[in-house]
Image (spheres, rainbow, N blue to C red):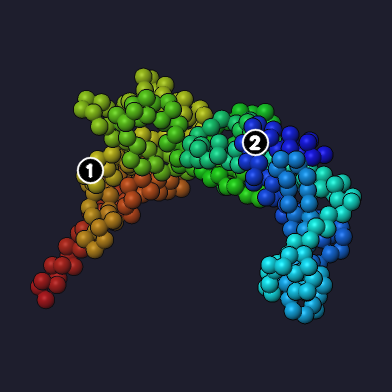
Amino acid sequence: MSKELLNALDALEVEKGIKKDVVIEALEAALVSAYKRNYGQAQNVEVEFDKTRGDIHVFAVKEVVAEVFDSRLEVSLEEAVQINRAYEIGDTIRFEVTPKNFGRIAAQTAKQVIMQRVREAERGIIYDEYIQYENEIVTGEVERHDHRYVYVNLGKVEAVLSHQDQIPGEEYKSHDRIKVYIYKVENTSKGPQVFVSRSHPDLLKRLFEQEIPEIFDGTVEIISIAREAGDRAKVAVRSHSEGVDPVGTCVGPRGERIQTIVNELKGENMDVVEWREDPAEFISNALNPAEVIDVQFNPENERACTVIVPDNQLSLAIGKRGQNARLAAKLTGFKIDIKSESEFAKISDTSDAANSDTEED
């Protein structure tokens, strides 16, 4: 057993990168517990592993005292000096108590410790590999699903896709290959846990980087994203190179680039708008495809504004169930109140009349 154990420890160090000393330390601790459990002993014991021969020895550790009250933990000074005249009260002495059949227990324990260390090492390797992909997009294969998750095989680990991370209405069938965004990697007691998403706004950002070289190399920058997964998204972009149209670059010839992204997201509508330093211009662009007549900012709240649109553009500006206005607000970071031209005129007239009456008074 001793030679086999030494060979196993050497192989672990070479093949798995698990240090021999680390395994031996864990083995010695496990053998202390195994000895106490199997032999019903409560004394202080130490287990020593001979790294050269592979032999295992068990020692009872006793303290030298003037009067012995517990022979399992103590030894008298009189008995101690018979072993070595240098012993004094307070010293500790190790007595070998290795049972004859302890080799069988040691072999079983060693196997368990080694297997545990191998599992821990493999988990560590997988965690180290996938933590590199946190906040990145990868392609996986749908394996199965239950009431909590869709499980996606990423190669060496099975990632989980929760309900809130799924695109509403999208079906996931076994063996479907899908692109997912890794937003969290945890090293748990059961092994690495990888959480992925199809609804995360950064999935969209990574898809733009994959499909549009100018975004990947920094010529065009994504400033912000507002997304209602599976339905519609707005992406604000700016160019860092004079003469490069950021919107046209993202859309591509005949819309080919943006269509590839739309297809990957199963038909999610995509509005690409140009970011402008002037907030009024940016808000106007964000409400695309509606026309904007004017943007007036609230003097009491610098992040709130009223947007005036033509009467026939009001429903378009607000969008179905308020979606266009809602996404524009998320994209720009402004609270947006949309008014039709005639409605705003009435409000202005009423306000002017009120101010006039006040002045006359």
Judged from this view, the residue extending furthest toward the top is 253
Nearer mark to the viewer, of 1 and 2: 2
Mark 1 → mark 2, Cα distance in angstroms: 58 Å
Query: 255 or 109: nearer the eye?
Result: 109
Residue denoted by label 2 = 13
> Residue 12, located in which quarter of the rendered image?
top right
Give the x, y percent position of residue 11.
Answer: 69, 33
Mark number, residue 99: none
As drawn, 236 above or below 344? above
Contact flag, marks 1 and 2 (Cβ < 8 Å): no
Q: Secondary structure at mark 2?
A: helix
| Image-based side of 293 in relation to 185, left or right | left
Give the x, y percent position of residue 39.
Answer: 87, 60
Task: Give the class, few, some or many, for how many residues have Cα within 10 Å of label 2's Cα (few <14, many ≥20).
Answer: some
Mark number, residue 277: 1
| Image-based side of 317 in relation to 82, left or right | left
Q: Secondary structure at mark 1?
A: loop
Q: Residue at x 42, y 21 (%)?
A: 256
Query: 279 or 209: nearer the eye?
Result: 209
| Image-based side of 281 in relation to 71, left or right | left
Q: Residue at x 77, y 58 (%)?
A: 59
Q: Amino acid at mark 1?
A: Glu
Of pointers 1 and 2, the one earlier in the residue sequence: 2
Residue 166 visible in the shown view: no
Q: Amino acid at mark 2?
A: Glu
Q: Residue at x 87, y 54 (%)?
A: 99
